[in-house]
Image: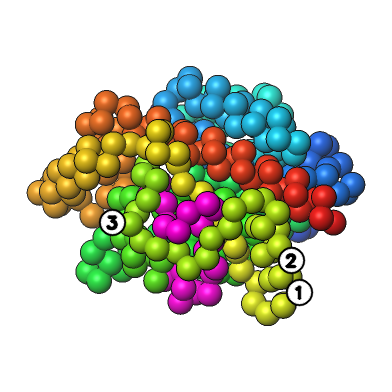
Amino acid sequence: MPQNPSDRRPAPRDSPGTNAYEPLLSAEVRAALSTGLPVVALESTIIAHGLPRPRNLSVARELEGLVRSAGAVPATVAVLDGRARIGLDGDQLERVAGDPAVRKLGHRDLAPALAAGADGATTVSATAFLAARAGIGVFATGGLGGVHREWAENQDESADLRLLARTGITVVCAGVKSILDVPATLQRLETLGVPVVGYGTGHFPGFYLSSSGEPVDWTVHSPEEVVEVIRAREALGGPVGALIVANPVAERDQLDPVLHDRVLAQALDACRERGISGQGVTPFLLDQLTRHTEGASLEANLAAVRGNVTLAARIAVAAADAR
């Protein structure tokens, strides 16, 4: 019978003290950071929990390849054997992709996971935290978490938002998942003081869709313009927080908007009828979208992630050139 993760003993440490819990940088990432080469952080939750096996491993390798082809160094983040690792080798990437026992870790889970000697894939909040702590300035993901529908009743809000409000990193994403309350999420980001710029668009992306219909206040058109925003924020000083670069999936790759709206409405009805609430809502809705769009939502998701990873690498290169 598999052991309960909470019953696991901490993995043996080489030496006592806080250094046993310091994040481990791969030799490649460490060398890149020390010499000023561009680095892009990548989350590992999409590998362990967001894609079917064995496709998840091929996608993980593809995303790292896209970063390299744009001239930057990929730094996929995960926790293995109770150590936060920034930059994975081939065996470690296979381990995250192939082990169904790998847990999902937000930033609040990091300390317990390290103490327990656990294995875990990092979400947006955990990846952003660890990457920024290592000195990585750019992070690419698919879509952010946000304010959930019917927030007034359940107070359900992703930990991503508060973490990004106090973490100085540039996040390239395709907006927030369209199953969330997009207007409320944008309002929350405004309240938290997190700037949002649309990349080549005047509207906030809808993750699977090129546009959520919600406007953004600022638009940039090149990696160099993003870097100027970063430099201006650094010069101004003030509270540390993320810059969100909202990069829409290409219209040719988006999920058919009519199909999206119909399936999402049906999924929300089913969710209410079955009494699904809390943390069960998001995986249920995402599963319904995948099933009832015959996988089209997954392909739109992957198209968005590829675009975000490529853009993030271009921004990292432009930032390195500017330095």
Residue at point 60%, 64% (across, down) = 242
Per the image, label 2 sits on a secondary structure element best described as helix
Mark 2–mark 1 Cα distance, whole angstroms, equals: 6 Å
- Please, is residue 148 above or below residue 207 in the view? below
Q: Residue 68, position in %: x, y?
A: 72, 32
- Please, is residue 302 above or below residue 83 in the view? above
Q: Which residue is mark 1?
A: 235
Residue 293 in sight? yes
Q: Amino acid at mark 2?
A: Arg
Label pair 2/1, CB-CB below 8 angstroms? yes
Seen as rendered, the residue at the extreme right is: 35
Q: Earlier in the sequence, mark 3 or mark 1?
A: 1
Which span of residues is magenta-colored? 188-207
Image position of 292 (left or right of 318): left
Per the image, label 1 sits on a secondary structure element best described as helix
Q: Which residue is mark 3?
A: 278
Residue 23 in sight? no
Tag of residue 231: 2
- Please, is residue 178 above or below residue 72 in the view? below
Q: Residue 100, position in %: x, y?
A: 46, 29
Residue at point 48%, 68% (across, down) = 217
